[in-house]
Every structure is written in structure tokens, then in C-alpha cells.
Image (cartoon, rainbow, N blue to C red):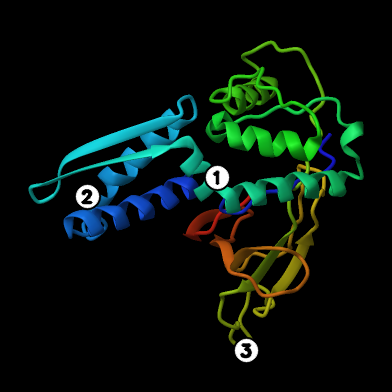
Amino acid sequence: RMLAHADAADAGGEALDELLLRHFAAEIEARHGVDALAGARSAERLRAACEGLRRVLSANRDASFSLECLVGETDVSGCLTRAQLEEMAAPLLGRVREACCAALRGAGLEPRDVYSVEMLGGLSRMPAVGEAVSTSFQMPTRRSLNAEEAVARGAALAAALSSRSFRAKEFAVCECLSAGYTFEWASTHPPPAAGAGGGAVASDLAGRVDAPARAPLPWRSSVEGTVPLTCEVRAGCDGAASPALLRAELKGGGGSQRRRPLVRRGGGAGA
């Protein structure tokens, strides 16, 4: 059973790669007078090199890279130490510590109440991240699970439990929403003509349902009607305006509905 959830926004591997990308782009421009981010191809090559350098620094104290003909005929190279990387990542590591403390507060626990801390994900291999988490929970972290396969294995097991083709030992999984969400809908159907047959359906059908954080899954809600609807999912359920994470059209009729995603943007936990 999940007691609490907290996340460190923009503090993952991609954020660290972005820091390295900007660092080396500025260094290359100062040294060679070329903008490595001006072209999509050169920017992507430099980003891939930064990601590889970050991975190497997880196990080594220094790393370097070289790229031939990155911009035109210009060859570039770069090097970095683990200490320099950790200095650059200090603000991100601070967010990681804050997220750990927020999770403890949300669960109503003290560090002494936690039995063990398991780390997953590629960035968990970075020693500084492990130290930040270990400091927050006041205990050594563990990496006994395969960081690359743990989520996929859990999803496969959940699918096997729902399938008739596999035999699996039954066990209960108590999931809940990691954050609050707001579901809004409104009719896109024009008002029915006066005296139209077939029964009139309210054309101003609109509503909103709040799904609070920690609501147990599966979470369901329904709305009566057969008119087309435009639905939006927004983060938070406090009434504050926020960008739509998902917008879709539901076309009613005959009891069946077809869903077509129109906009999907933003990050964060999925519902």
C-alpha cells in the first residue's frame, strides 16, 4: 500500500544531461567560436555525448568525449570530473532531498520507522544521488533489484494476473493516485432545434470531478448522455487553473464512445 508520493520536478537524468549540454555548448563556443546547438543534428550528437559522459562518471572519477565534425569541419572534445558534475548538480540533488523529506512527511513517518530504502532507475547509479537519499532517510540505500527491469517486470506480472493464459500466485496490489487530478467535460453538440423529435438532450452538459491524491485505483466516474463531449485532465484538484495534461473528444451514441487524444503535454505522474 502506497502511503505517500513525492517527486523532484526536473531533477532526473534528462535534467542533468541538459545541464551538461549547456555547459559544453558554452565551452565549445568559447573555444572554437561555433554554436553546437544551432543545428538539430549537432545538438543531438552533443546531447548523446553528454549522456554517455554522465553514465561513465557514475563509475569513474573522470571522463571525456570527442566528436569529429560536430559543426562543419570542427572537431570538439570535452572532459569532466565527478566532483565537477556533482557541483553542477547540487541544485538538483537538493530537490531530491526535499522530495524524500516530503514523502516521509506525507506518510507520517520518521526515518527510524523505515525498514529499507530501495533505489531504482538509471540515475540511482550516480553516487551523489545515493548519498542524498541515504542522508534523507538516515540509512544506507539498497539496489537489490534490477534498476532497468523492475518496472517492466511488475507491469508484466500485473498483466499475467489479469490474463487467463497464465497462472500466477494471487496477491493484492493497493494502488492509488500519486497526485490530485481534475476531470472537466463540456458538450460540443449544438442545441437541438425546437420541436426536434427523438427526445431532447441538454446541450450545455458540463461538469467537473476531482480525483484527490491517494484516491484508490481503479478510480471511476461516469456521466449520463450521448452527446459529444470535450474532456480535459488537469493536475491538481484545488480549483486553480493549470495547463491541460490531456484533452480528448468523446463521441457518444449507441452506448459506445471513441476516444481520440488531441493534446498530450507536460510531465509528472500519470493517472
Question: Label 1: few (<14), some or many (≥20) within 10 Å?
Answer: some
The kind of residue tagged 3 is Ala
Q: Earlier in the sequence, mark 2 or mark 3?
A: 2
Q: Residue 230, relative to residue 215: is it above or below?
A: below
State the residue in front, 209 or 237: 237
Label 1 and label 3: CA atoms lie apart by 57 Å
State the residue in front, 170 or 95: 95
Label 2 and label 3: CA atoms lie apart by 62 Å
The kind of residue tagged 1 is Gly
Residue drawn at 56 percent across, 29 percent down: 125
Left or right of 242, for residue 117: right
The circle on residue 172 is none
The kind of residue tagged 2 is Ser
Left or right of 226, for residue 20: left
Where residue 169 sits, quadrant-wise, is top right
Name the residue carrying label 1: 12
From where the camera sits, is residue 189 visible? Answer: yes
Q: Earlier in the sequence, mark 1 or mark 3?
A: 1
Where's residue 54, x and y in %?
43, 36
Most extreme residue toward the bottom is 194
Where's residue 146, x and y in %?
59, 19
Q: Earlier in the sequence, mark 1 or mark 2?
A: 1
Where residue 218 sits, quadrant-wise, is top right
Left or right of 236, for residue 266: left
Q: Residue 257, relative to residue 57: is it above or below?
A: below
State the residue in front, 184 or 165: 184
Name the residue carrying label 2: 42
Most extreme residue toward the left is 73
Where's residue 59, x and y in %?
48, 24
* Picture quarter with the N terminus: top right
